[in-house]
Amino acid sequence: MKIPLLAFNDKGIYCQQADVYLDPWRPVKNAIITHGHADHSRWGHQNYITHNMNVPIIKHRLGEINVTGKEWGETFVINNVKFSLHPAGHIIGSSQIRVEHKGEVWVFTGDYKTEDDGISTPYEVVKCDTFITECTFGLPAFNWTPQAEVISEINNWWAENRAEGRTSILFGYSLGKAQRLLKYLDTDIGKIYTHGAIENMTNVLRPMVYFPPTELITRETKREALLGNIVLAPPSAHGSIWIRKMTPFVTGSASGWMAFRGARRRRAIDKGFVLSDHCDWHSLLESVKATGAERVICTHGYTDIFAKYLRELGYDARTEKTQYEGESAEMEKEEKETEADQNETSIISEK
């Protein structure tokens, strides 16, 4: 029986021919990492390979690790298996992994989006025989509004809050979403303040991308100084003492899940902005078609529904269980980091 080029086991996605794992969730000897989110880049591997832009990101999150950086499209060979990294467009430094052996090509997307956000290297179509795709938002109900319209909506919301003398608190994941928001906030409206988790991660990324100036909230920050301005904070800071000291404030959240009204209510958010770093339904379908793949493996998200629809279109499509969790994980996995950075910055002054 032929050994598949990539197989799913209890440690991750394994290439037996090269003895290499892709985004493994348990410690392994050799790991190729698509991007810096915690469900894809975990601590404990002996050797890491990733894109050069992702190197400082995972070092910031994982500490001292043995990591090798690669350029886009650079071929590296391990035991006669050819690997290369290609832009995924998900966040800064995010990659798809192309694997080729004996004329067979597989592509693992990790997480990806096809809309150019202006800060990540734009998604690149990579032709292949087998395409491993996420399905975080693999339902027809998910149909994203163009980024420019959402950003305009966010800036208008901030301006309205400023006119009413209230602080705007905007939640976004500390890696990826926060920087995407920061890049396009209108500094003519006011100043941009940050939570420690976002400030620290943004400083890691500033050498690669220009971002507007920000001011870290510290123990010395006065509540009055925040009025009319905007605060970028990770979702896990919502409801904390750190937030409650900022009254009067209005909260907003930028996430694909904001497409569901119930998600905003459950999270007690005043305003939801539908902005995702993952593909919507149509982008997923277009991406699959563009690869020319005959076989599709659906990993995290609405896998069963998406795979079933692909089979109806004539694809050889199936699902595989992984420990990748998509957008919800990007929020939940950063809680420890958020707590640590919050302790550093402490609570703002009540004076």
Image (tube, helix red, strand yellow):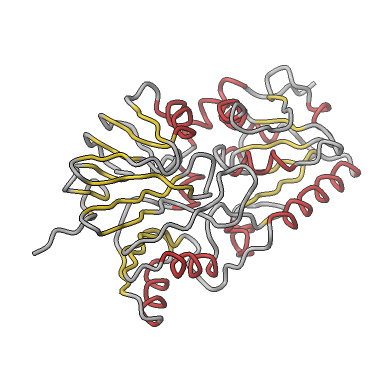
Q: State which quadrant residue 320 falls in.
A: bottom left
- Against 344, residue 230 (above or below) is below
Residue 243 % position (x, y): 67, 35
Is 151 displayed left or right of 260 in the figure?
right
For the point 68% across and 63% down, the residue is 145
Q: Residue furthest right?
A: 163
- In the image, residue 214 sits, relative to residue 82, either above or below, namely above
Side of 85 where 28 appears, left or right = left
Tell whether 149 sits left or right of 179.
right
Q: Nearest the camera: 51 or 325?
A: 51
The foreground one among 173 and 236 is 173
Q: Residue furthest top?
A: 220
Residue at 80%, 41% in the rendered image: 186
Question: In the depicted view, which residue is nearer to us: 155 or 49?
Answer: 49
- Provide residue 141's location: percent of width, then percent of height: 57, 72
Task: Name the spot of residue 338 as percent of width and height, x first.
Answer: 53, 32
Residue found at x 76% / y 23%: 350
The C terminus sits in image quarter: top right
